[in-house]
Image (tube, helix red, strand yellow):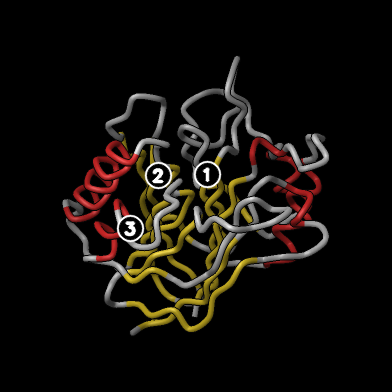
Amino acid sequence: MIKAASYNIRKGIGTDRRRNPERILDILREIDADIITLQEADRRFGDRICVLPPNLLADHSDWKPVPLGNRAGSMGWHGNVILVRKAADILHHADIHLPALEPRGAVMADVRTTGGTIRVVGMHLDLSGLWRRRQAAAIMAHVDACADRLPTVMMGDLNDWSANGGCLRDFGRHYTLATTGPSFHARRPIGKLDRIMVSPTLRIADCGVHQTALSRKGSDHLPIWAVIEPA
């Protein structure tokens, strides 16, 4: 079994309007997932440095970042970061370029863990429904074009308020969506914007939204998680 989690950390700025990377790391420790995708993990302007300093992860966590950063000081691609256990082997990683009006991207990594080898895709989709569907198609096409077929988990902020339409319907034709529940807004969650999806070779053994006193302050989104096992 593998525990996966996704979290839009809003550049480390909490509902108290304070940027606090240490608080984000404390929330990740509460969740204690084997694989984590983060959104809005790099600052938007300037050098786009990562919100979580590398030394903070190295010295005070059990995770390491998949090496996706294309800029000095950046850890992700368009703010998307994948963290894995330090004991895991990163077999392959790639940025996924998406059609978009505003800067958007997705990231992918093949990871060997104690629970098995898995393909992980992290994403943060557009605010526009039309572009979200185009981006969903591009992500699935990228995965389908990979030479190696691996059990796949996709996670991220889909920005889709619908119950099962739009890009959710598109993903749902090929992947099972975890019923994690609403994750936005952190103070009063009503929107299921954050999602975890798995390929047919995997099943969701358990899942949920991580709601604690700390997570309600860490970002405007709550983290989501799922325990995944072979189908």
Q: Is residue 68 above or below residue 212?
A: above
Give the CA separation, mark 3 to mark 2: 19 Å
Question: Which mark sits nearer the N-terminus, 1 or 3?
Answer: 1
Please indicate whether residue 172 sits to the left or right of residue 110 in the image.
left
Q: Amino acid at mark 2?
A: Val
Q: Residue at x 52, y 44 (%)?
A: 81
Give SS at disc 3: helix
Please indicate whether residue 146 sits to the left or right of residue 69 in the image.
left
Q: Which mark is residue 107?
A: 2
Q: Amino acid at mark 1?
A: Val
Q: Nearer the viewer, mark 1 or mark 3?
A: 3
Q: Position of residue 118 (x, y in %)?
A: 38, 66
- Residue linked to disc 1: 81
Res 48 quadrant in image = top right
- Residue linked to disc 3: 168
Question: Which mark sits nearer the N-terminus, 3 or 2?
Answer: 2
Q: Nearer the viewer, mark 3 or mark 2?
A: 3
Question: Which mark sits nearer the N-terminus, 1 or 2?
Answer: 1
The local crowd at label 2, few if under 14, some if 14 to 19, many if 20 or more residues have their Cα within 10 Å, is many
Q: Position of residue 165 (x, y in %)?
A: 30, 57
Frontmost residue, 100 versus 93: 100
